[in-house]
Image (cartoon, helix red, strand yellow):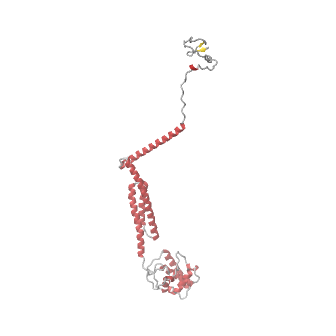
Amino acid sequence: MKYCTKCGKALDDNVKFCTNCGEPMPTSAPQPAPQSTPQPNPQATQPVAPPPVDQQVSKPVQPEPPVDNSGNGGKKTVIILAVALACVVVICAVVLVIFATRDSGYSSETEVTTAVETTLVSNVADVGRYRSLMKRFNDAKLKAAKRGVGVKKAKNAAKEALESYKEAIDDRDASLMSDYGDEAEKYVSKLEKAANKAKKKTTVAQAPRVQSQYNVPESQKTNYRVAPTSSVGEYYFDDILDDDADRYAATTLAINEYYARHGCKFVTPALQEYFEHQKWYKNQGKSTSSVSLSGTEAHNATRLQKDRQWYKKNMAGASGQASDFSYSDFVRVAKMVN
């Protein structure tokens, strides 16, 4: 048995035409019969045999499903959103700058950008200028303090100008930075001139040294100091010297030493000769009544004078004057104290 190639009807092997559709049958060897296709049974479902090869309907090729790149796509989306957001922020900032500076006379974005760049450059330059002025200000203060110069007025004016200059720099106000910078420069220069001018006055005010009648060579001079430099109590020399006569001489020498430090010239030859042999002594021809002692010097001189009166009571024939001692007595006591 064979089948019609057109309608699929079962025919006898010797039939040349299909009895159903009239299609001529080939004379080649008979084809094997396809498997029978049973009718579907609603109570028992069985697989249906496919039709002959010639009767199968070719199905369209289904496209392959797209590759899921959701991971990389998400990252790209985030980057794109970030760039877009940054662009929006920049645009908004430019718009705000334009509106903020519209009343300042800027007519274009180019002018605004130029003004901002100029302000930043000016701010950096003024910071360096401010630091330089502060260094000069501090140096001038230190110089004045070392020389004992009173420059309070100039110092306060310079300090106030520098503070205003710093505020202008912090506010980035170009016009104020220029004005306050020039003002600070002026007052710092005045402070420096005040310190230098005071030094010249001090040098000029020094009295010339009087020619000594002793003409002691420098090689023969000593550097003894008997008078205490700090405030003392009563009987200062009791812990230094054992004999009242030596204590009496030491108090006499110490009291007159305070005046010798101020360049006084002494009437008593023994005292004058002793001080002429001291390296630190500068004879300016002053009298003891024309100089003013410092607070500590005045206190110690008064205290030592009371001690001197006490020691004099134990000295037979003492007159209470420096003439009670010779040059050699003063040298001997000075060696013992030093």
Query: Looking at the image, which is closer to me, 69 or 178?
Result: 69
What residue is rendered at 38% in x and 49% in y? 112
| Rendering coords of residue 118 (x, y %) | 40, 53
Query: Looking at the image, which is closer to me, 23 or 231?
Result: 23
- Give the residue furthest to the right: 44
Q: Which quadrant would the C terminus be assigned to in this image?
A: bottom right
Picture layout, residue 91 above or below residue 47: below
| Rendering coords of residue 307 (x, y %) | 54, 80
Query: Looking at the image, which is closer to me, 2 or 69?
Result: 2
Query: Looking at the image, which is closer to me, 38 or 126?
Result: 38
Picture layout, residue 325 above or below residue 293: below
Q: Which quadrant would the N terminus be assigned to in this image?
A: top right
| Rendering coords of residue 18 (x, y %) | 56, 12
Q: Can residue 310 be seen in the rendering of this structure? A: no
In the rendered image, which quarter is residue 136 located in? bottom left
What residue is rendered at 41% in x and 68% in y? 194
Q: Is residue 186 left or right of residue 75?
A: left
Q: Can residue 119 be seen in the rendering of this structure? A: yes
| Rendering coords of residue 70 (x, y %) | 54, 36
- Give the residue furthest to the front: 28
Q: Is residue 151 left or right of residue 221?
A: left
Picture layout, residue 101 above or below residue 33: below
Count of all numbered marks drawn on residues in the image: 0
